[in-house]
Image (spheres, grey):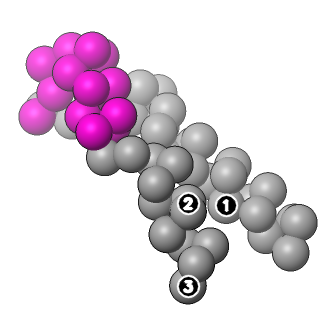
Amino acid sequence: MKQELAQDIALMRYSMISPLIVGLPDEYKSKEAYFRAASARGALGLMSRKSTN
């Protein structure tokens, strides 16, 4: 279980930074716009929903 949680956290972190590495999609005009949208999605909220399933 610990390994699965660690992997889930790593994947969540990667999904947050990968657009910055490979290039932002055209829908974001700046890094700030991307971070605002990512914050609104609530990446940590996604993790808590997964753990309840």
Q: Is residue 46 left or right of residue 28?
A: right
Relative image position of residue 19 (x, y in whole percent): 38, 35
Which residue is more in the foreground, 37 or 18?
37
> Of marks 1 and 3, which one's residue comes earlier in the chain?
1
**Which residue is pictured at 16% across the width and 27% down the height?**
28
The residue lying furthest to the bottom in this view is: 53
At label 1, the amino acid type is: Asp
Q: Residues within 10 Å of mark 3 (few under 14, many from 20)?
A: few
Answer whether residue 2 is visible to the viewer in this image: yes
Residue at image mark 2: 47
Q: Is residue 4 left or right of residue 36?
A: right
**3 above or below 21?**
below
Q: Residues within 10 Å of mark 2 (few under 14, many from 20)?
A: some
| Numbered circle sitting on residue 8 | 1
Q: Residues within 10 Å of mark 1 (few under 14, many from 20)?
A: some
Does 37 lie within the magenta span?
A: yes
Which residue is more in the foreground, 20 or 7?
7
**Which residue is pictured at 68% across the width and 52% down the height?**
9
> Of marks 2 and 1, which one's residue comes earlier in the chain?
1
Q: Are marks 3 and 2 in contact (CB under 8 Å)?
A: no
> Of marks 3 and 2, which one's residue comes earlier in the chain?
2
- Real-space Cα distance between discs 3 and 2? 10 Å
The answer to which quarter of the image holds residue 48 is: bottom right
**Which residue is pictured at 62% across the width and 73% down the height?**
51
- Real-space Cα distance between discs 2 and 1? 8 Å
User: Helix or strand or loop: what does disc 1 sit on?
Assistant: helix
- Real-space Cα distance between discs 1 and 3? 14 Å
Relative image position of residue 8 (x, y in whole percent): 67, 61
**10 above or below 39?**
below
Residue at image mark 3: 53
Q: In the image, which residues are magenta?
A: 27-40
